[in-house]
Structures are given as structure tokens and as C-alpha cells.
């Protein structure tokens, strides 16, 4: 069977819908046994976005959830799983297939401008959550007090006019939210005599949203959004997943592990399956073998090298994994009737699917050492970091520590552990990381071009000051500004390339010149050669000629000598040939670069000279 564009379930994360519409499914069902029969009561599954976590949890729910109307009926599971790997394990299927109540909730969409706003969205989510179990109100197995409590929860969550700015209303609803998961497991146990499987998705997304919104608040009294949200989600998870006698298993998904009282340390007997943890490493994402099989089914075996280079490279506990959503997008587009699968160019799907605020903040606020380490990653290098554990969702806007940024980027898919790097000398949480593939590298480069451009007000201001210093003949100030910009500058090009400094200064001048009438010429034929950079301001009747040199020496005296040689080259090559006729003042600069350092030599010539 050769797959066509319409066979790929792009955007489908509901397992039942996927199976019933006949879309392609890479069988991960064998992992169900490991999930359900592990020794851990709670499993924290940490993956970057788009790695198939939602589909995996939907598959788990569809497998274990009993038929509430007829608990002995497992025909639905028979229909969905009969052709999948797990079905061959009859002992496991008899024990768990269609045998458990399921309490599943996603916290992904809990968001708002402040705590009240976010809790309003929580109210909508919980209304839908409770409605699923409304049938229990008609049961003879439930006592009247419990049914009255459920009925009241549904009424409160459905009340669009409930004003949560009133403390009594907020307190009442907050308690409903905190108790929601545990409460339903109790009712389900009374009804079916079976323990509940809990699935809580994206538990840290609402914490990230709350953290970001809290930092935007000018009034300190309004900045407790994060703390209040943390209290709610901590209590919600703790009551359901710690010492809950109605729990069979708990599964919590997200990107980061937040060690705060009852968020994760409050879980009962939990294990973490993250990017560097051995458990369930191949459950989410495609293995190389699975990717090869997909390509064969598409008749696109010749594209394996492209797919791995652009979308592979993720090291999950020693296994090379590929982001499934991105591969599905690529194959779906490549197989469109108007496309040539053999030549369809790889595209950047990651940029539109994952927030990259962390890249921008890291680049804008980078210290010199952070800038150097980021540049090394951009150049294809590896950086050794100490993985950080977070007691709260990190305030990345206030933290300049490279290891914090790198840990966040590791968990969100912008970096991966380098499998081929030598083991770091330091033990414990130390790992070597790199950018995983060309797609993510392109995201980095695009962000570099955006950050070190006119959209960054700090960068724009420095560019304007440098331009003013050059036209004023202030070589010392020019050198100071260039050095400060070099310390934070990241290049989307190879920094070993000598012309990178030319491109760096050319870019800076272009930013500043947009606000003036300065004309810029790069590598233009002038006199007896080609000048590196010429700036002309007709209004001031001043021209600037700049010649660059790159030094391999660590010696400042060598830099000084080289800057003087650059200045001398301007005169020898007659780069000012016609400028002295048209401008009152011609300023000549020789600039020697070494790494993030520079030395500037200056000479002034006037028309009457």
C-alpha cells in the first residue's frame, strides 16, 4: 500500500477519531503494558510540544476506560484495538482493557489576564468535565448527599453570571476546582467498584501562562496570579494523586517538572519520564525505524537523509527520536498532487507550532558568557550545562543564568542531549547539549535576525550611538560601543568566517542609517581597490571609510598594529579618491577584530588638506 497525502492525520489527536477515519497510525500500543504495570503509582511524562503526548493519552484512555452504561461491554475496545500490537497480549487485555473508570482533564486552555480571568476559563473546562459524569445523578448506588454535591458543582460551573471577583464566590469555586478530580474518582468507585485511572494533561502550561501574566502586572497586589494558580493546581493534583484510595494509576503530562510542595513532591510514589529518563522513552515521537517504514510506504525512501537532518536528532534517553507531528506535515505536503515527493524541500514547521519567547529573552538579556555559549551552539557546537530543577515555573525574564535557559530549551525541544559528546567530567545533572536539527537551527537563526535588528530598541539605540561616534571622529567611544555590542551579538553565520565582522558592522550601520540620510556602500570599487565600508552624510558633508582586519593573536599590541595597517591601506589604495572633492571631512577608520574584542584607529582628512 502506497500512502497518499490524505492518509496522514495532521491535527488529529483523538485516538478513536483517528482509527475510525482510517488514517495512518504508528502503533505505540505495546507501551500500554509498561504504563499500566509499572511500579509507579503516578508517571510524569515530560515531552516538548507536538511529540504526540495528547494522542498517546487519548489512546490510553480509549484502551482502559470502561463502558459506563454497560461495564461488561468491551466491544468498543475490540473494534479499536483488534489490529494493533497490544491486542496480542490477551492476559494484559483481560486485566485492563475496558476495566477502569477514567478521569481525564487538560489544563492547556486555562489562561487569562489575571487570576479571576483564568479561573473563569477553568470554570468552563470543569463544567464540561462534570457533565460527562452527569449520568451518576440517576444512580441508586450514589447517596443523596453526593448527588447533591455533584449537582451543585455543575450549577456553579455552568453559571455564566457568577462573579469571581467576589471573595465568597471565588473561594467556593476554588474549592470545587481543587476537589474536582478526587471527588469524581470517589463517585466512580462507588458506582463500579473499580479504581480510577487519572490523566492530567499539560499541568505546567497554566503555570507558565500565570508566570508570564504576573510579570506584566504593575500593581504588586495584582502580581500574585502565579502563586494563587499554583495553589489551585497543587491542591487539585495532590488530592487526586496522593493517598487517594480510589486511584489505580495517575499520568501527568507537561514540559517541566515543578518541584513545589504538592505539585510533584505531593504525588504518591511517582516516577518521571523525561528527555533523559529511561522509562517510556519510545512511547512519544517516532523512532528512526518507524520513520524509515513510513517513508517506504510513501515511496520516499530517498528522503531519509533530509528528514533526519531537518527533523530528527532528538535524544530521548539514548534513543534517536523524530517529532511525529512535523514528519506527518512534511509527508502530507510532499505527497500533494502538485508536489514532487522526490524534490519537495523540507520546511520549518516548528516555528509556527512552538512559542520561542525563551530564545528571544535569552538573546536579548545575554551576558557575555551566555552570548559566547549561544554562539557556539549556533555554530554547531556542544555546550556542557548543569540541568536545573525548578521549585517554581522559572521566571526566565528575570534570570540570566545560561544553565536555566539551556534547561528550559532542553525541555521545550530547542536543544537535545548530544549522544556523541564525551561524558562530562562532572557527575550528577551535568549534560552536553546541542541544537538537534536544521529546522530548530533555522528557528534560532530567524530569532537572531529579529533580535539583533531594529525591532530591538536597545540594539537600535546602540547602533545610532555608534553611527554618531563614527561621524564625530570619536574612535574611543566607537570602540567601546562596538565591544559592548559584540559581547551580546550572535551571528546566524559561521563565526569562523572572516567577513562576519564586516557583516556585523554592515548590519548595525544599516539599522541606524534607516533613521538618517546616510548612504552606505559595501565592498565598492574605489581608488585602486575595494573599500570595506563607506558611509556618506550629505547633510553634514562628512564621509567615513572603514577597513576591517581579523587578528588571530591574543596580543593587544598586535591588534593595535593591525588596526594601523588597516588605516594605512585606506591611504595606499586611495579609497578617498573622490570623496575629498565632495565632502568637507573624510574620516578614516582601521578596525582590528579578535573574537569579541576590537581596536579602532582613526584619521581625519579635510578637503583643504
Image: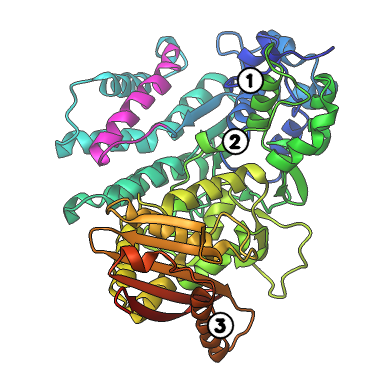
Nearest to the observer: residue 495 or residue 568 = 568
Where is the N terminus found, in terms of image quarters?
top right
Q: Are marks 2 and 1 in contact (CB under 8 Å)?
A: no
How far apart, in angstroms, are the residues tagged by discs 3 and 2?
A: 42 Å
Residue indicated by mark 3: 562
Label 3 Cα crowd, 10 Å radius (few <14 / some 14-19 / many 20+): many
How far apart, in angstroms, are the residues tagged by discs 2 and 1?
A: 32 Å
Name the colouring of the figure: rainbow
**Residue 113 seen:** yes
Circle 3 SS class: helix
Residue 358 at x, y = what percent? Answer: 46, 52
Circle 2 SS class: loop
Q: Are marks 3 and 2 in contact (CB under 8 Å)?
A: no
Q: Compared with residue 111, is residue 520 higher up or lower down, i.e. above or below?
A: below
Taken as a whole, is the magenta stretch helix, strand or loop?
helix
How far apart, in angstroms, are the residues tagged by discs 1 and 3?
A: 71 Å
Give the mark nearest the N terminus, 3 or 2: 2
**Residue 73 seen:** no
Chain part drawn in magenta = 109-135
Residue that sits furthest to the left in the current view: 166
Residue 130 at x, y = what percent? Answer: 40, 21
Residue 297 at x, y = what percent? Answer: 83, 20
Give the mark nearest the N terminus, 1 or 3: 1
**Does the segment drawn in magenta span residue 116?**
yes
Residue indicated by mark 2: 348
Label 1 Cα crowd, 10 Å radius (few <14 / some 14-19 / many 20+): many
Residue 87: assigned label: none
Give the mark nearest the N terminus, 2 or 1: 1
Circle 1 SS class: helix
Residue 62: assigned label: 1
Nearest to the observer: residue 127 or residue 110 = 110
Nearest to the observer: residue 31 or residue 307 = 307
Amino acid at each position: 500500500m502506497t500512502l497518499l497525502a490524505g492518509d496522514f492525520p495532521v491535527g488529529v489527536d483523538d485516538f478513536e477519531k483517528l482509527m475510525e477515519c482510517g488514517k495512518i497510525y504508528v502503533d505505540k500500543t505495546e507501551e500500554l503494558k509498561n504504563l499500566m504495570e509499572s511500579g509507579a503509582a503516578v508517571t510524569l511524562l515530560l515531552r516538548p510540544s507536538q511529540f504526540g503526548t495528547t494522542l498517546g493519552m487519548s489512546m490510553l484512555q480509549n484502551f482502559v476506560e470502561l463502558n459506563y452504561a454497560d461495564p461488561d461491554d468491551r466491544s468498543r475496545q475490540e473494534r479499536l484495538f483488534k489490529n494493533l500490537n497490544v491486542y496480542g497480549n490477551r492476559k494484559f487485555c483481560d486485566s485492563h482493557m475496558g476495566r477502569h473508570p477514567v478521569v481525564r482533564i487538560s489544563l492547556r486552555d486555562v489562561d487569562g489576564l489575571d487570576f479571576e480571568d483564568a479561573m473563569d476559563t477553568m470554570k468552563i473546562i470543569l463544567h464540561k468535565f462534570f457533565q460527562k459524569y452527569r449520568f451518576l445523578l440517576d444512580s441508586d448506588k450514589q447517596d443523596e448527599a453526593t448527588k447533591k454535591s455533584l449537582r451543585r458543582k455543575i450549577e456553579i460551573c455552568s453559571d455564566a453570571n457568577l462573579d469571581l471577583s467576589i471573595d465568597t464566590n471565588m473561594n467556593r469555586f476554588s474549592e470545587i476546582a481543587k476537589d474536582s478530580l478526587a471527588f469524581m474518582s470517589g463517585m466512580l468507585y462507588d458506582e463500579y467498584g473499580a479504581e480510577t485511572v487519572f490523566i492530567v494533561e499539560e499541568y505546567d502550561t497554566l503555570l507558565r501562562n500565570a508566570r508570564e501574566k504576573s510579570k506584566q502586572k504593575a500593581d504588586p497586589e495584582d502580581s500574585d496570579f502565579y502563586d494563587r494558580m499554583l495553589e489551585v493546581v497543587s491542591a487539585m493534583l495532590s488530592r487526586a494523586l496522593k493517598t487517594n484510595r480510589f486511584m489505580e494509576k495517575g499520568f501527568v503530562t507537561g514540559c517541566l517538572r515543578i518541584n513545589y510542595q504538592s505539585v510533584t513532591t505531593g504525588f504518591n510514589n511517582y516516577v518521571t519520564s523525561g528527555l533523559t529518563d529511561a522509562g517510556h522513552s519510545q512511547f512519544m515521537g517516532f523512532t528512526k525505524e518507524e520513520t524509515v517504514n513510513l517513508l517506504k510506504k510513501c515511496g520516499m525512501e530517498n528522503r531519509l537523509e533530509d528528514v533526519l537532518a531537518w527533523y530528527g536528532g532528538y535524544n530521548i534517553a539514548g534513543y534517536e527520536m523524530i517529532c511525529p507531528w512535523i514528519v506527518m506535515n512534511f509527508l502530507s505536503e510532499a505527497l500533494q498532487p502538485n508536489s514532487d515527493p522526490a524534490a519537495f524541500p523540507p520546511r520549518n514547521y516548528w516555528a509556527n507550532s512552538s512559542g520561542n519567547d525563551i530564545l528571544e529573552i535569552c538573546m536579548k538579556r545575554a551576558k557575555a558568557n551566555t552570548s559566547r555559549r549561544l554562539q557556539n551552539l549556533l555554530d554547531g557546537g556542544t555546550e556542557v550545562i548543569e540541568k536545573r530543577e525548578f521549585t517554581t515555573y522559572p521566571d526566565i525574564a528575570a534570570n540570566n543564568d545560561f544553565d536555566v535557559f539551556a534547561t528550559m530549551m532542553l525541555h521545550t525541544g530547542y536543544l537535545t542531549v548530544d549522544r556523541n559528546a564525551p561524558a562530562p567530567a562532572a557527575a550528577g545533572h551535568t549534560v552536553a547539549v546541542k541544537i538537534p536539527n536544521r529546522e530548530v537551527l533555522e528557528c534560532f537563526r530567524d530569532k537572531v535576525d529579529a533580535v539583533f535588528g531594529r525591532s530591538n530598541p536597545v540594539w537600535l539605540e546602540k547602533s545610532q550611538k555608534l553611527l554618531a561616534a563614527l561621524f564625530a571622529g570619536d574612535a574611543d567611544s566607537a570602540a567601546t560601543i562596538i565591544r559592548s555590542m559584540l559581547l551580546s551579538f550572535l551571528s546566524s553565520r559561521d563565526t569562523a568566517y572572516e567577513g562576519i565582522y564586516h557583516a556585523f558592522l554592515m548590519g548595525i550601520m544599516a539599522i541606524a542609517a534607516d533613521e538618517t540620510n546616510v548612504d552606505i556602500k559595501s565592498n565598492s570599487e574605489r581608488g585602486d581597490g575595494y573599500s570595506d565600508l563607506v558611509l556618506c552624510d550629505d547633510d553634514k558633508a562628512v564621509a567615513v571609510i572603514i577597513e576591517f582586519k581579523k587578528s588571530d593573536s591574543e596580543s593587544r599590541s598586535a591588534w593595535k598594529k593591525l588596526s594601523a595597517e588597516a588605516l594605512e591601506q585606506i591611504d595606499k589604495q586611495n579609497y578617498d579618491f573622490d570623496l575629498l572633492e565632495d565632502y568637507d571631512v573624510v574620516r578614516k577608520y582601521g578596525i582590528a577584530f579578535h573574537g569579541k574584542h576590537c581596536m579602532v584607529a582613526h584619521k581625519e582628512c579635510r578637503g583643504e588638506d
